[in-house]
Image (tube, rainbow, N blue to C red):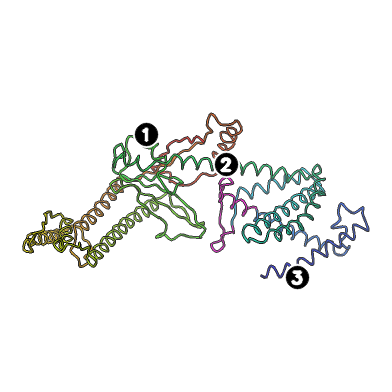
């Protein structure tokens, strides 16, 4: 609000008066067109105006640098620009960033342009085309916002570009005559950046589509069995990939090239969220893949823009394994609560058949659920139930005695404890014991060394873009830091797109 008031009542009137004064001076003295700004300044105000102009140029350059950082950051978030190192300078404001490579690039280009042109007229012509181009792009985008987001009337929305676009087209037609006199510079820069952004986005989309298309189906995993068609050895495999759903094709490459795979497999996907810091207890999100005996999990590791990655020490592995243990416990608790709820619903609302002679059939099925089998006929007498009830009592006594001898505990709910609850608790302890054994055996980090190639039947232009331009940018841009340097195994993969 304060910025709007300052611009409306201070900045805009000053700019209007300055431009009107320069235009009046230019009409009276046409020969001063080359240095109209300083020529129109009175003699006694030259040095104060020179100082103010220098400060204004510094502020404008800082605004341009910040805008460049922001545009490139947003382009990287949309996979439209190669990955670069981004340094966030504030924990309160996400937009305050610094990109070292872009900063050095702007400095070198500014020095090169000034040293090449050596004339303010050529630089002014380049600036004029860039400025009018920005105005036309802004008008076009505002029109799209009016139509698609605000959903204004089409006639009212088109009146905006009809008015402002007409004026801007007149300006554009005038500045395009200066292309040979320095106006080619912004057009050349924009063309180069357009090619880079298009190539990176095109290759990234094709690579992601290939990963999704080549995902391993769940039916194939079931056919392989819990051993995955190979030997499961003690240890934990952390397989890094970019998919948040499904089983990536990198696992198939591991199974083909490696003689064995670890007993616990975790697919890790690193994601950066627009918050400064993610708490450690909310860092990892887990989900089970395949049945329990496969010991395969999906993990999404979330980092804020001010979080420092700790992959090069054991803290990352320690936090991940602890979070996996908490996930297993929470999963067992939720399953136990769900089973207890089903038992309560069944006890409160039993399904009673119409035939009164089969009144106690649900109780018989409940006893068979406990592992006690017998048949019930229509002539069953109540006295015949004593033997199964005694067996149930002996079964519960055996469970209590096993608990007193050190077997795993479970939650008592007031209902008769079923064998399913015991099996769930035993299964949890078995999984935790297997996880601890795998942890003691060591953690290995797997990452795919991917290469993207165009198919042989592709067009020549596609082969040129993918095999040379996109591959060159992938090799030289900033790679994803997804794994530490210790206990790291890279497996080569080729995506045919």
CA distance for labels 3 and 1: 71 Å
Residue at 32% across, 46% down? 264
Q: What label does residue 383 carry, if any? A: none
Residue at 59% across, 31% down? 459
User: Relative to the observer, which residue lies in front, 487 or 151?
Assistant: 151
Q: Are marks 2 and 3 in contact (CB under 8 Å)?
A: no
Looking at marks 1 and 2 on the same chain, the residue that comes earlier in the sequence is marked by 2
Residue 275 picture location, percent across and down: 51, 60
| In the rendered image, the vertical position of residue 142 relative to residue 348, given as above or below | above
Residue 90 picture location, percent across and down: 56, 61
Residue 113 picture location, percent across and down: 74, 45
Q: Secondary structure at mark 2?
A: helix
Alpha-carbon neighbours of circle 3 within 10 Å: few (<14), some, or many (≥20)?
few
Q: Secondary structure at mark 1?
A: helix
Q: Left of 2 or right of it: where is 489?
A: left
Q: Left of 254 or right of it: where is 466?
A: right
Would you say residue 469 is visible in this rendering? yes
| In the rendered image, the vertical position of residue 274 relative to residue 489, given as above or below | below
Would you say residue 62 is visible in this rendering? no
Image quadrant where one finds the N terminus: bottom right
Q: What label does residue 9 carry, if any? A: 3
Alpha-carbon neighbours of circle 2 within 10 Å: few (<14), some, or many (≥20)?
some
| Tag 2 residue | 202
Q: What label does residue 256 carry, if any? A: 1
- Extent of the magenta region: 68-96
User: Relative to the observer, which residue lies in front, 93 or 113?
Assistant: 93
Looking at marks 3 and 1 on the same chain, the residue that comes earlier in the sequence is marked by 3
Q: Secondary structure at mark 3?
A: helix
């Amino acid at each position: 609000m304060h910025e709007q008031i300052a611009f409306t009542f201070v900045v805009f009137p000053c700019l209007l008066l300055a431009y009107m004064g320069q235009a009046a001076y230019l009409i009276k003295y046409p020969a001063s067109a080359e240095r109209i700004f300083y020529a129109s300044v009175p003699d006694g105000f030259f040095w104060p105006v020179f100082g103010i102009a220098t400060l204004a140029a510094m502020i404008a350059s800082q605004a341009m640098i910040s805008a460049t950082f922001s545009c490139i950051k947003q382009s990287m978030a949309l996979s439209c620009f190669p990955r670069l190192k981004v340094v966030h300078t504030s924990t309160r404001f996400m937009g305050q960033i610094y990109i070292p490579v872009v900063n050095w690039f702007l400095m070198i280009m500014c020095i090169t342009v000034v040293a090449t042109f050596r004339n303010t007229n050529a630089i002014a012509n380049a600036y004029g085309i860039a400025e009018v181009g920005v105005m036309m792009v802004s008008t076009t985008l505002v029109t799209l916002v009016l139509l698609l987001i605000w959903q204004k009337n089409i006639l009212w929305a088109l009146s905006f570009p009809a008015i402002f676009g007409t004026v801007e087209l007149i300006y554009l037609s005038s500045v395009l005559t200066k292309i040979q006199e320095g106006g080619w510079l912004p057009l050349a820069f924009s063309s180069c950046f357009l090619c880079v952004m298009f190539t990176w986005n095109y290759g990234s989309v094709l690579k992601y589509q290939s990963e999704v298309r080549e995902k391993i189906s769940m039916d194939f995993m079931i056919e392989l069995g819990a051993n995955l068609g190979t030997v499961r050895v003690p240890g934990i495999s952390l397989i890094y990939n970019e998919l948040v759903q499904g089983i990536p094709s990198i696992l198939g490459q591991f199974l083909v090239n490696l003689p064995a795979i670890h007993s616990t497999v975790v697919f890790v996907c690193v994601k950066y969220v627009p918050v400064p810091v993610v708490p450690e207890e909310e860092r990892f999100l887990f989900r089970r893949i395949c049945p329990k005996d496969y010991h395969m999990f999906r993990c999404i590791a979330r980092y804020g823009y001010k979080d420092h990655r700790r992959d090069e020490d054991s803290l990352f592995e320690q936090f991940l394994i602890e979070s996996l243990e908490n996930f297993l416990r929470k999963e067992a608790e939720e399953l136990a609560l769900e089973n207890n709820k089903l038992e309560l619903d069944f006890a409160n609302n039993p399904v009673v058949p119409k035939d009164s002679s089969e009144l106690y059939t649900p109780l018989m099925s409940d006893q068979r659920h406990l592992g006690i089998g017998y048949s019930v006929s229509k002539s069953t007498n109540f006295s015949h139930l004593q033997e199964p009830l005694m067996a149930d009592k002996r079964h519960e006594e055996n469970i209590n005695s096993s608990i007193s001898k050190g077997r795993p505990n479970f939650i008592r709910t007031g209902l008769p404890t079923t064998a399913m609850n015991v099996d769930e608790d035993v299964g949890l302890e078995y999984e935790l014991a297997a996880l601890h054994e795998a942890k003691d055996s060591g953690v290995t980090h797997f990452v795919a060394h991917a290469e993207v190639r165009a198919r042989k039947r592709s067009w020549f232009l596609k082969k040129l873009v993918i095999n040379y331009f996109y591959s060159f940018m992938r090799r030289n841009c900033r790679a994803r830091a997804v794994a530490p340097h210790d206990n790291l195994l890279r497996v080569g993969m080729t995506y045919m797109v």
